[in-house]
RNA sequence: GGGCCGUUAGCUCAGUAGGUAGAGCACCGGACUUUUAAUCCGGGUGUCGCAGGUUCGAUUCCUGCACGGCUCACCA
């Protein structure tokens, strides 16, 4: 800092010699930049003075006049400063203004000879000194690592990055609007849990000093939200962070945002309906149409969405009957297909792999994949006509898994059996197996209505809607290794 | 965790078949009252990611490490 900012410190001294405070207080705006542009005709005609503020992104000095570009969160506008208007002393202050400085200006709006909408500055206030040079004005900031580590610079320099996060915000807002309009209430459930449940994943551990107990960051809010359904909240949702102690990749961040919602007296069929309506209505609100381009694919959200029965789909694609074939037969067939597998895989794991390898790559447009094996769905109700399958679906869009839903298992006896099965897997070393949650079973013993539940990955949905190939592009501060010395 | 690639000025990037390095923008000094990648004149501001090795000499070659990207694995 000492070297980089040395000249800038000189400028602060110079500013102070003019009696200028380099880090000023409140500035009252009459307009944002976009408001000035929107109101241009009346502002220009009336000659009324506007007050706005932002960061100087470029300065063009012309002796006794200066042009500069002022950027706020709504856009950029040119300002025009003249010595004969401000007077010698005020104008001299502009000699020490740098690109990156924060400035408030007041003046009337006009069009230059070149046709550029411009603020004719009558007065200005120095609001904040920038001590470091901004990245290059033309090429901007491209270094991906720096963009993530110093997201503020990324946001200053790259308007398309700002737009991604504005869209993310609007997306979440529209989801809330939709659910609120349908009578859902939003709740917050524990991030720190005694027993991490609701998903098959490895948790982060932490410790509470006063209680002297180990706690886990939640891997899902599911079991708490369902306790609320037991409590009579018939339509609840939560949009919040989950934490999973797993690898980092272009589609995995250790903390990520999930929407989970539960509707009493529904099931996975009603969840399919709700899911389709939710996402299509949000897409329509955000884009005014049903098609979105993602990584060269045109994704069509027009309902109704395709429904694919998983056992049939896999059988058609691979000849493997995931219900009737023995594990040995499945392995033999997989070998014949040239698919790598491990002897330790059980039926559920095998099905998952078959889905990922053979089905998922073809799921461009929104597709519900239904009827998953119960073994990998320990919290889902089994189908009445075939108890080997769960009343469950996953939603795939653009080859990515976006959502997961099921008819919630509300039979405490069956839930206990499922937990015990998971416990056996855990005993055999499966670190992702679900823990037994006695307190949750007790809640079920009070009676949970038949319920449909749905989870939607907000980050991945945002990726789809912003054409982002990495999850880090839609998370403001993705987890990175700390820099070494 | 494996493989491949990258790391040079504040930023975007060149470059040195081994002799401590350049461009544009930014920045500094000067000129300029309608410019907008302003223009014109002058100025290079650097631990070439870090640590070792080879060498008379390493930013360059070798090894290890760090961080990042892509990818495979893991992973819902």
Image: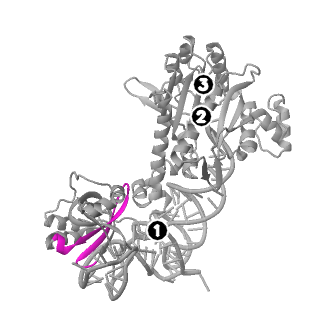
Decide whether the magenta segment is chiefly helix, strand or loop. strand
Number of the label disc, if any, that sits on residue A275? 2
Of badges 2 and 3, nearer the viewer stands 2
The reply to whether discs 2 and 1 touch (Cβ–Cβ < 8 Å) is no
Tell me what residue is drawn at x 61 percent, y 26 percent. A434
Q: Residues within 10 Å of mark 2 (few under 14, many from 20)?
A: many
Give the CA separation, mark 2 to mark 1. Answer: 41 Å
Residue that extends furthest to the top in the rendered view of this protein: A446
Q: Residues within 10 Å of mark 3 (few under 14, many from 20)?
A: many
Tell me what residue is drawn at x 18 percent, y 65 percent. A15
| SS type, badge 2 | helix
Q: Is residue A42 above or below residue A343?
A: below
Q: Quadrant of the N terminus of chain A?
A: bottom left
Number of the label disc, if any, that sits on residue A452? 3
The chain ID associated with circle 1 is A
- Residue A81 highlighted magenta (yes or no): yes
Q: Is residue A138 above or below residue A306?
A: below
**x and y percent of residue A432 in the render?**
62, 32
The chain ID associated with circle 2 is A
User: What segment is highlighted magenta in the picture?
Assistant: A62-86
Query: Of residues A57 and B3, which is closer to you in this image?
Result: A57
Sequence-first disc among 2 and 3: 2
Q: Quadrant of the C terminus of chain A?
A: bottom left
């Amino acid at each position: 800092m000492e070297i980089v900012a040395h000249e800038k410190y000189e400028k602060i001294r110079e500013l102070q010699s003019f009696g200028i405070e380099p880090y000023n207080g409140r500035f009252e705006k009459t307009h944002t930049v976009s408001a000035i542009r929107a109101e241009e005709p009346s502002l220009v005609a009336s000659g009324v003075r506007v007050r706005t503020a932002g960061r100087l992104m470029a300065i063009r000095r012309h002796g006794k006049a200066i042009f500069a570009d002022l950027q706020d969160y709504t856009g950029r506008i040119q300002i025009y400063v003249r010595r004969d208007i401000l007077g010698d002393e005020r104008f001299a202050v502009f000699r020490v203004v740098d690109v990156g400085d924060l400035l408030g200006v007041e003046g009337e709006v006009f069009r230059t000879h070149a046709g550029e909408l411009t603020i004719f500055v009558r007065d200005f206030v120095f609001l904040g000194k920038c001590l470091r040079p901004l990245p290059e004005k033309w090429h901007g900031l491209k270094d991906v690592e720096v963009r993530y580590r110093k997201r503020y610079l990324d946001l200053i320099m790259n308007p398309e990055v700002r737009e991604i996060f504005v869209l993310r915000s609007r997306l979440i807002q529209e989801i809330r609007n939709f659910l609120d309009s349908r009578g859902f209430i939003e709740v917050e459930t524990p991030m720190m849990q005694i027993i991490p449940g609701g998903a098959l994943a490895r948790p982060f551990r932490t410790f509470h000093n006063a209680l002297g107990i180990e706690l886990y960051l939640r891997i899902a809010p599911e079991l708490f939200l369902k306790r609320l359904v037991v409590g009579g909240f018939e339509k609840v949702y939560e949009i919040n962070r989950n934490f999973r102690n797993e690898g980092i990749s272009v589609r995995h961040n250790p903390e990520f945002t999930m929407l989970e919602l539960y509707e009493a007296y529904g099931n996975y069929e009603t969840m399919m309906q709700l899911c389709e309506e939710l996402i299509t209505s949000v897409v329509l609100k955000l884009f005014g149409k049903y098609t979105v381009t993602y990584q060269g694919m045109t994704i069509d959200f027009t309902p109704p969405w395709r429904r694919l029965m998983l056992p049939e789909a896999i059988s058609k694609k691979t000849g493997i009957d995931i219900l009737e074939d023995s594990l040995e037969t499945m392995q033999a067939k997989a070998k014949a297909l040239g698919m790598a597998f491990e002897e330790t895989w059980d039926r559920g794991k095998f099905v998952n792999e078959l889905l990922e390898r053979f089905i998922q790559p073809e799921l461009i447009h929104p597709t519900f994949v239904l009827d998953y094996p119960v073994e990998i769905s320990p919290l889902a109700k089994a189908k009445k006509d075939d108890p080997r399958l769960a009343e469950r679906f996953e939603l795939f869009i653009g080859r990515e898994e976006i959502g997961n839903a099921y008819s919630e298992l509300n039979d405490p006896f069956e839930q206990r059996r499922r937990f015990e099965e998971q416990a056996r897997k855990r005993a055999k070393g499966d670190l992702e197996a679900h823990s037994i949650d006695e307190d949750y079973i007790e809640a079920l013993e009070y009676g949970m209505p038949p319920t449909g539940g749905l989870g939607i990955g907000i980050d991945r949905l945002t990726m789809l809607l912003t054409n982002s190939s990495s999850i880090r592009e839609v998370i403001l501060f993705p987890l990175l290794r700390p820099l070494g010395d």
